[in-house]
Amino acid sequence: METNSKWIKFNYKSALLFFAITILTNLIFLPVLTSFGISRPFGLFLLTSIGSSAGLSFILLAKHGFYKTKKQATIFTAVVTLVCTASCYFLMYLS
């Protein structure tokens, strides 16, 4: 069996932590954003993209040690943020 795989290994604890971070971000901060006058769909888009990118970056960088240098971690976080924002935009507005 090959141990040097390029696929990221997720276990159920990491998946639960990722979904907990994303859901709690929405539950806690959506009422705050709507009280400031931001529309609910835009608030969901904003918070889901922030929560998912923060959760995925935390799990892969802090828990799984998916980086060797700080520059690599910064680039990885930027790419994860772009991908999460694009996928949230697609799910909220284009589907």
Image: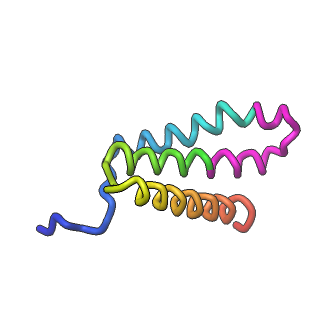
| Residue 87: x %, y % from top left | 61, 63
| Residue 1: x %, y % from top left | 11, 67
Q: Is residue 5 magenta?
A: no
Instruction: Count all numbered tags in the image, as a single digit.
Output: 0
Image color mode: rainbow
- Residue depicted at 63% across the width and 48% down the height: 48
- Residue depicted at 66% across the width and 61% down the height: 91
| Residue 55: x %, y % from top left | 49, 45
Residue extending farthest left: 1
Q: Quadrant of residue 62?
A: top left
- Relative placement, left or right, of 84 versus 59 is right
- Residue depicted at 41% across the width and 53% down the height: 70
Q: Quadrant of residue 81?
A: bottom right
The span picked out in magenta is: 32-49
In front here: 17 or 71? 71
Is the C terminus in the top left, top right, bottom left or bottom right quadrant?
A: bottom right
- Relative placement, left or right, of 54 versus 31 is left
Residue extending farthest right: 37
- Residue depicted at 52% across the width and 63% down the height: 79
Q: Is residue 42 magenta?
A: yes
In front here: 62 or 49? 62
Q: Main secondary structure of the magenta part?
A: helix
Q: Is residue 35 above or below residue 71?
A: above
| Residue 59: x %, y % from top left | 40, 46
